[in-house]
Amino acid sequence: MKLPYYPGCTLKANAKHFEDAAHKALEKLDFFLHIARAFGLSGEFTSKGQFLLAFRELLLEQHYRGKRLLLIVDECQLLSHDLLEEIRLFSNLEQNGVKLINIFFVGQLEFNDILLLPENKAIRQRITVTYNLPPLSLEETGQYIEHRLTVAGATKRIFAKNTIPEIFEFSKGYPRLINIICDRALLTGFIASSKQIDKKIIRSKVLTGGNADIKQSADAIEISMAKDSRHPFDTIITLELEGPVAEIKPISVSTSQSLGFNKKAQASNVYQNNWAYTADKALDDDMSTRWATDAGVTKAWLTIDLEKEETFSKIIIREAYNRIQDFELQIKDDERWKTFYHGKKIGEKGIFNFDPITSQYLRLNILKATDGPTLWEVQILP
């Protein structure tokens, strides 16, 4: 039998694969065949002994090459006692007192309870190192949510800072529960973002049990439930409308007087390319967010697309750290930037008045700063 060479010599096995075999009443031999195929052992094995001989030969070959195989069993809380015993036998394989294989069990906390069962005493005694990952802290919960959203492609903050403690309280810091809560919140937020409901609700149902009071007006749907009817993690309510949901036209509602509120913005530099500090943060009328640049940046620009030509005569800029020493306000005229205001310092609240100007594109051109410029808000007023 020719044995393959493994550069990493690592196998990650999901316990569910083993359990699927057990549920189908297959022989233990099928378990060994699964391990053999995963490690690349060719040939047919008609007995447990044949497999163990071939498997030991593989382990010895890797041992003489200065390598050791690693078997990682994921979702190990799904393993039956019989399969745990078979895996334990692998720990008996050694050469001159040196173990030929390392076994890692990875699973949920209930695996600890499984190991404490009397019938699992032998394998419990073989485990030399254990580690329990604690739940995430409040701060880590916020960082975890931000990271997952960034990986998914989010370019702006979705969950307000004051929602993180609520998510943490319900999830207790467990990532799976955090995922469920955030997923339901995103779905609910998506539905609630439409303020104009022109399709009548003809039927509703609470999938998680209980009753909900549904009130519909021309521009809103109000859903209320008694506290004892709410599911602790994911209350799900279905609404059946008289027509396709896709025909409901979403609208944007804002109390901001700024012509630049939530408009498109670009910047020459963003702090560590982190979405939490992108240019649009200076246009959201939220003093808890900001556009920031990297340390050491002394020149930068911020452009704003108002989406159509607008007339404005006043701009308010709220700066953090008072770093800007020289700047220009510009509009785009025939694809060229034209300066209509030149100033020195901006400060915590710089108010700049000028004769009315009409343009679709506006740029703050920072000519000099003592360090990376940072802006809380830019407001463009008629």
Image (cartoon, helix red, strand yellow):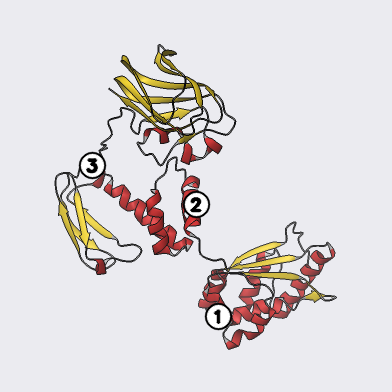
Q: Which residue is mark 3?
A: 247
- Residue on which the image places disc 2: 143
Q: Residue furthest bottom?
A: 118
Q: Is residue 236 left or right of residue 126?
A: left
Type of amino acid under label 2: Gln
How dense is the environment of label 3, judged by Cα within 10 Å: few (below 14), some, or many (20 and up)?
A: few
**Near-viewer residue (358 or 126):** 358
Question: Image height check: is 41 above or below 319?
Answer: below
Q: Amino acid at mark 1?
A: Ile
Judging depth in this view, the residue of 47 and 262 nearest the camera is 262
Amino acid type at image mark 3: Glu
Q: Nearer the viewer, residue 43 or 142?
A: 142
Q: Is residue 225 above or below residue 91?
A: above
Please tell me whether mark 2 sits on a helix, a strand or a loop.
helix
Are the residues flagged by discs 3 and 1 in contact, CB closer than 8 Å?
no
**SS for dot 3:** helix
> Where is the N terminus found, in terms of image quarters?
bottom right
Q: In the image, what residue occupies the spot 35% across and 36% down?
A: 285
Residue 207 image point, x, y percent: 27, 64
Measure how far apart labels 1 and 2 are at the Cα level. 32 Å
User: Which sits earlier in the primary sequence, circle 3 or circle 2?
Assistant: 2
